[in-house]
Amino acid sequence: ETAVFQTPNYHVTQVGNEVSFNCKQTLGHDTMYWYKQDSKKLLKIMFSYNNKQLIVNETVPRRFSPQSSDKAHLNLRIKSVEPEDSAVYLCASSYGEQYFGPGTRLTVL
Amino acid sequence: GQQVQQSPASLVLQEGENAELQCNFSSTATRLQWFYQRPGGSLVSLLSNPSGTKHTGRLTSTTVTKERRGSLHISSSQITDSGTYLCAMATGGNNKLTFGQGTVLSVIP
């Protein structure tokens, strides 16, 4: 049963545009995350948020920024996308074990 | 930095055979979490345990934290088990996950 929701499923855009991805969890967890899965399928953490406080930012370019209105929502904004941003972006939440959303596939032309 | 190594990279089994997937990690982990990912699909959490052995259905996860290794045993494999199995170690107070490259399992009739 899905409890971490992401929109959109897919997004195609051009270099230099701004994009925003949404994530919502209904599990009541305190911590949410964004991961990036590249073309080699390796998953790497980008951000984690705990009660609206940024805990981890793993050398992510400054054009990426997480945005949270409450502990159930963590959105990801990318200003001025670049070709290497093409990937699947996965949102997760946890209270111990992590649960993932279905992902948003971004293609930058 | 923190690393997670999975082996084998790929595995082909005949239906009904057992599989043993290995995971070694480079630093102290609070727990290991195993995921399953179908081609083009989202991550499904399989098992998560800090140490010892945990079972669910045909899956058994064993984590030996002191030796920085873990394994996932799949008994009586089925064709529908085909996909990528990812091992991730959780570290830090925010349970940040560091993923391995995955094992691609193919179960054939």
Image (cartoon, rainbow, N blue to C red):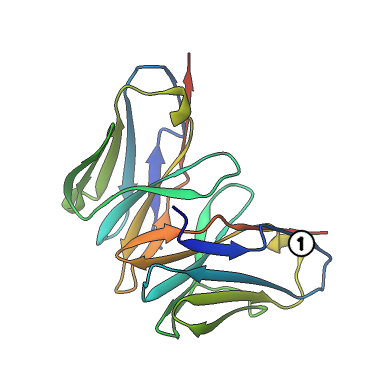
- Secondary element type, mark 1: helix
In percent of width and height, residue A61 lies at 63, 75
Question: Going by the image, does B65 lie left or right of A16?
Answer: left
Q: Nearer the viewer, residue B73 or A23?
A: A23
Q: Residue at x 30, y 38 (%)?
A: B72
Mark 1 — on which chain does it sit? A
Label 1 sits on residue: A83
Residue B103, quarter of picture: top left
Rendered view: B6 above or below B16: below
In percent of width and height, residue A33 lies at 47, 69
Q: How many numbered marks does the figure carry?
A: 1
Q: Nearer the viewer, residue A9 or B51?
A: A9
Q: Residue at x 29, y 59 (%)?
A: B27
Question: Going by the image, does A67 lie left or right of B76?
Answer: right
Residue A31, quarter of picture: bottom left
Q: Residue at x 24, y 62 (%)?
A: B30
Q: Nearer the viewer, residue B84 or A27?
A: A27
Q: Which residue type carries mark 1? A: Pro
Rendered view: A100 above or below A49: above
Quadrant in which the N terminus of chain B appears: bottom left
In percent of width and height, residue A40 lies at 60, 47
In percent of width and height, residue A79 lies at 72, 78
Q: Residue at x 26, y 57 (%)?
A: B31
